[in-house]
Amino acid sequence: MYLSSDQFGEFLAFFFIAKSFLIFNAILNLRLQSRAADNPPAITSVIGIYVLYLIFVWYGLTKSFKWSSSQLVHGYSGLLQALLDYIYTDLIINIVIVAAVTWALTKKFTDPSNISKIEHYTDEPATVT
């Protein structure tokens, strides 16, 4: 029901061969259809973005496979428990709480009612009347 390490390796090889072919065609089409591709730094940047995309996809797939493989040792209940732990630690604590603290600090320092008024001074001498 789940992939073995060899099957996962074959999947990654097929996936990256297919993605590399599609990216290569996209870059060729970009060179034919875009004036920006005539600029060497621009096309190099696009190629760099695609390479980073492939690296991040490989990292995410590999990390997900290793994580789920280690959790399936305990059966599906182990996987469910690990998913609940992930939801609690990574989603609730790391996202909701960090977002709330960030929002509160931003509100405190950027809310106009919390910013004290600064008197404007001029260089002109005061006149006595």
Image: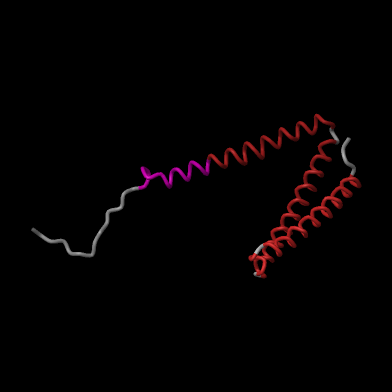
Residue 13 horizontal side relative to residue 117, left or right: right
Residue 93 horizontal side relative to residue 113, left or right: right
- Image vertical order of residue 19 relative to residue 79, above or below: below
Residue 116 horizontal side relative to residue 87, left or right: left
Residue at the front extreme, as displayed: 33
Q: Nearer the viewer, residue 56 or 84?
A: 56
Determine if the magenta segment contains residue 104.
yes
Residue 44 figure quarter: bottom right
Residue 30 figure quarter: bottom right
Task: Where is residue 104? Give x, y as percent.
Answer: 48, 41
Residue stretch in magenta: 101-115
Q: Main secondary structure of the magenta part?
A: helix
* Residue located 31% across and 49% down the image: 117
Residue at the top extreme, as displayed: 77
Q: How many marks?
A: 0
Task: Where is residue 11? Give x, y as percent.
Answer: 86, 47
Task: Where is residue 68? Give x, y as percent.
Answer: 80, 39
In the rendered image, the quadrant that contains the N terminus is top right
* Residue located 90% across and 42% down the image: 4
* Residue located 66% across and 35% down the image: 88
Determine if the magenta segment contains residue 8.
no
